[in-house]
Image (cartoon, rainbow, N blue to C red):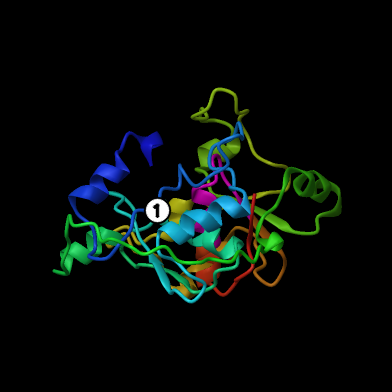
Amino acid sequence: MKADGRQPQQEYAEKHIPGAMFFDIDKVSDQTSPYSHALPQPWLFSDYACHLGISNDTHVVVYDNHDKFSAFSSPRAWWMLRVFGHQRVSVLEGGLPKWIKEGHPVTSEVMQIDKTEFDVNYQPHLLKKFEDMVQNLSTHSFQVMDARSSERFAGTAEEPSKETKGGHIPYSHNIPFTSLFNSETRTFKSPEEMKEIFDSAGIDLNKPLASSCGSGITACIIALGAHIAGKEDVGNV
């Protein structure tokens, strides 16, 4: 992500897993929206997927190269693919750092990919819109979890965007995305540990659930965490 001062495309050009294509989560978004990482129009995502060589039969494995967490932006790609109906998608455990540490090959060569066809099958239950969130304040039809730090959740830490008010959505539960990783290996915790984290935060994985954050990235991490714990239909705000 460029927002955190990194140059992801340059990092990809320097080294990546052989055969991997660069998925730009900043580019494949609604560029007309005032909000970062807004979901793109279906036709735009379909066109982008086609140029990456993704078809409806492709098993896609996404990963990233974050220096602190095994997965940071890759869960966003995982979630977007699922929103547009692609179920055969996985996140590489440990990301590129673990891949390299285990001695697997990397390359700077970019493969030439033939354009494919990707038919979108939009899954609206995986996306919560503003109107859904407002209505939920009175209906409480689904639980909301917040991936930000406890300080940002409480409103005691400044938000990255000056236009964003401190605090949190009423009735939401705080699950800092950092709590889902093992501190030593930087890999995701086990399904059993995930269940304990959600349970401790007051989340019932048997009931409807949505995730939120500040820019649409870390919400996907806790959505993936819930998926690991057995909850496969988490919506994202």
Image spot of residue 79 (x, y percent): 53, 60
Residue at 65 percent across and 60 percent down: it is 126
Image spot of residue 114 (x, y percent): 36, 64
Image spot of residue 25 (x, y percent): 45, 47
Q: Residues within 10 Å of mark 1 (few under 14, many from 20)?
A: many
Q: Residue furthest right?
A: 138
Q: Which residue is mark 1?
A: 23
Reply yes or no: does residue 139 show up in magenta.
no
Depth order, front residue of 90/116: 116
Element carrying mark 1: loop
Query: Along the horizontal axis of the image, is 158 left or right of 6?
Result: right
Residue at 68 percent across and 49 percent down: it is 172
* Image quadrant in which you'd find residue 10: top left
Depth order, front residue of 168/40: 40
Q: Which residues are magenta?
A: 211-223
Instruction: Please determine whether, in this image, residue 150 is positioned above or below residue 56.
Output: above
| Count of marks, rendered view | 1
Image spot of residue 177 (x, y percent): 47, 52
Amino acid on which the number 1 mark rests in the picture? Phe
Residue at 72 percent across and 65 percent down: it is 208
